[in-house]
Image (spheres, rainbow, N blue to C red):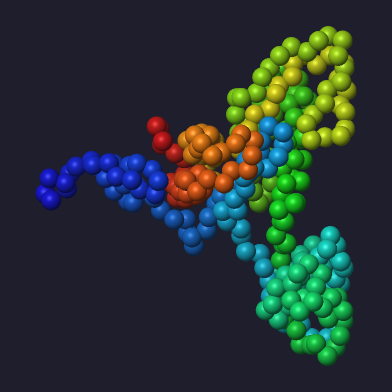
Amino acid sequence: MSAEKGSTRREAWGGLVLSRSFRGTARRHFRVRPGGVMAIFSVYVVNKAGGLIYQLDHYAPRADTEKTFSFPLDLVLRPHDERVVVAFGQRDGIRVGHAVLAINGAEVNGRFTADGKDVLEFLGNPANYPVSIRFGRHRLSSNEKLMLASMFHSLFAIGSQLSPEVGSSGIEMLETDTFKLHCFQTLTGTVWPQAPGTALLCFARTIRELCFPHPPVIMAPGIKFVVLADPRQAGIDSLLRKIYEIYSDFALKNPFYSLEMPIRCELFDQNLKLALEVAEKAGPFGPGS
């Protein structure tokens, strides 16, 4: 036992092989952010054709607000995209655009309550008051995520072509006041010269044709790894490359995985989640990570 105290015996920890001395250092230096707030929100993997092949919601900040109301309701509600949203009136954290998520503690299903009643008709009946309503941002459905991934793929390609310089890398980061979108595209695409007389360039997943007089090159897209994170989070570039390594090790080397198809590999899931946790607690990855 005494011989093991100072040893650096290698052990598997969460899917990664780490030395005992490194694990001790990690436990001393990795600190959870105040209040346990996570800074990496979600991860998307988009294939070469613009299809979403993997998506993970790592953390979604809670912006739900629940209040008890008396009749008449002092908010104007309207149906929108199969949901009931606030169209006018803001109070106590409830904002225009927030959707009705639950009534009296029961989750709503789009425009209907848990027992199948129309939400607007239910809230228009004085006999149902007082009523407790929870408002918040609606959760994206699987179809909406697929559509947004395809749209970003097209915007990425358009951004590459709008660049005044040849061989642009495309969109690498989009910044808002609440999050940053980081994108890393693999270097698996092919570059070849464009014929001088050709004026038509078609992008995958789009029905619109963009015309350029003499586009010098065409860049075939690679796999895109997209991370949505808090604007203050550091080390996202290293994290994106770490995700690429995990994809190469646990998806591409899986004999049952087909290229360009949805990723359903347990080891990929486990190691990706571990990488996100390490990035949140430690900031940037160290050399050789």
How many labels sit on residues? 0
Against 142, is 66 above or below?
below
- The image quarter containing residue 50 is top right
Quarter location, residue 112? bottom right
Q: Nearer the viewer, residue 183 or 247?
A: 247
Residue extending farthest front = 256
Q: Is residue 112 something one can see in this rendering? A: yes
Percent from the top left, x then y, of residue 232? 56, 47
For residue 74, above or below residue 214: below
Residue 42's place in the image compared with 212, above or below, is below
The location of residue 185, given as percent across then percent down, is: 62, 31
Left/right of residue 273 with respect to residue 102 in the rendered view: left
Q: Is residue 153 left or right of residue 239?
A: right
Q: Residue lying furthest bottom in this view? A: 127
List x then y, in percent, for residue 121. 87, 79
Residue at 86% of width from left, 14% of height from top? Answer: 198
Q: Which quadrant of the figure contains the C terminus?
A: top left
Of 280 and 242, nearer the camera is 242
Q: Residue at x 65, y 29 (%)?
A: 222
Q: Nearer the viewer, residue 248 or 129?
A: 248
The image position of residue 266, as x and y in percent, is 50, 48
Left or right, 43 with respect to 195, comes to left
The residue shown at (38%, 43%) is 16
Report the residue at 71% width, 66% height from top: 136
| Residue at the limit of the structure toward the top, as seen here | 196
Residue 89 visible within the image: no
